[in-house]
Image: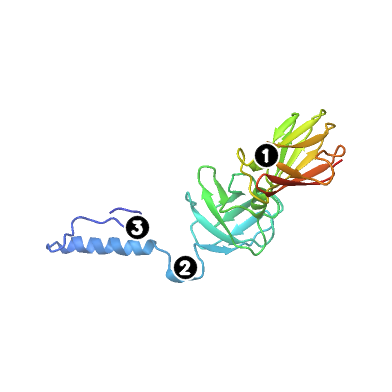
Amino acid sequence: MANEYYTYTSDLVPGETVLSGFFDDELKAIEEAFDKLSNPGDLKVGANIGADDTGTANNYVVDNGGEDTLVDYQLTTFRPLTDNIGAAVIDVNSSGNKEIVRNDGSPLQAGDLLAGVPTMIIYDEDEDRWVMVGATSEQTQAAARPGINNQTGTAYTVVASDELKLIRCTNAAAITVTVPPESTTNLPIGFITHIYQAGAGQVTISPGSGVTIRHPTTLKTRVQYASLSLIKIATNEFQVVGDAG
């Protein structure tokens, strides 16, 4: 069994006599393997694992007692001294400044690194840069945002992925937004989406076959820039609230 720490020799066979020189060589190989391991005392205090930053904003400096020659997939954890205010670099163990990027490869944005908050990075040898492990808070927030569904035509049918989104209607002509029945699109109870008249065309919400839409006035936007919210309150039953007219 060969690895970077120790290579087993077949000269030692259980139950058989060997020359003392073979045994001495094997013990020496084992001793050298242990020498390559980190000192247990160093591991307890974080050497070769993590360290505090001693640099400045966007120019971080970390010395965790490890080697200055970086290897692919090498992990480092550090506690930034200051928040970053944009793209940033880090010098780990005097290996030179290397860019830190998000886990999608894009440059850091302000606030991705926070003072005093431990951050793990992994070295990408191919790109000669450090990559953050895990998503940033901004990435997590962005993924949670429902987004906008831009519709430029005069007819659209609501789909499940419209939940919490703004359906933005921009056509200058009249627009019909159809609410589908349970039989074709099983929207969950409590489903809500928002319909916005961004263009000159008035938007009408139209019930599909078997669908009932409750409303106090009409199912049309009152004027340009008006919006209506569509909420599913029961099987094939919806409520519309908002600026109707």
Residue type at tag 2: Leu
Secondary element under disc 1, as helix, strand or loop, is loop
Badge 3: few (under 14), some or many (20 or more) residues near its Cα, within 10 Å? Answer: some
Q: Nearer the viewer, mark 3 or mark 1?
A: 1
Q: Which mark is residue 54?
A: none
Q: Are marks 1 and 2 in contact (CB under 8 Å)?
A: no
Give the x, y percent position of residue 189.
65, 50
> Residue placed farthest to the front in the image?
210
Q: Position of residue 29 (x, y in %)?
A: 29, 60
The residue under the point 45% across, 71% down is 41
* Residue plotted at (18% across, 62% down): 21
* Disc 1: which residue: 210
**How far apart are the two marked residues, 3 and 1, measured between alpha carbons?**
72 Å
Task: Give whichever of discs 3 and 1 has the lower sequence position.
Answer: 3
Mark 3 vs mark 2, CA separation in Å = 18 Å
Q: Are marks 3 and 1 in contact (CB under 8 Å)?
A: no
Q: Which residue position is annotated with label 3?
A: 5
Which of these two is toward me, 147 or 67? 147
Residue closer to the observer: 13 or 181: 181
- The amino acid beneath tag 1 is Gly
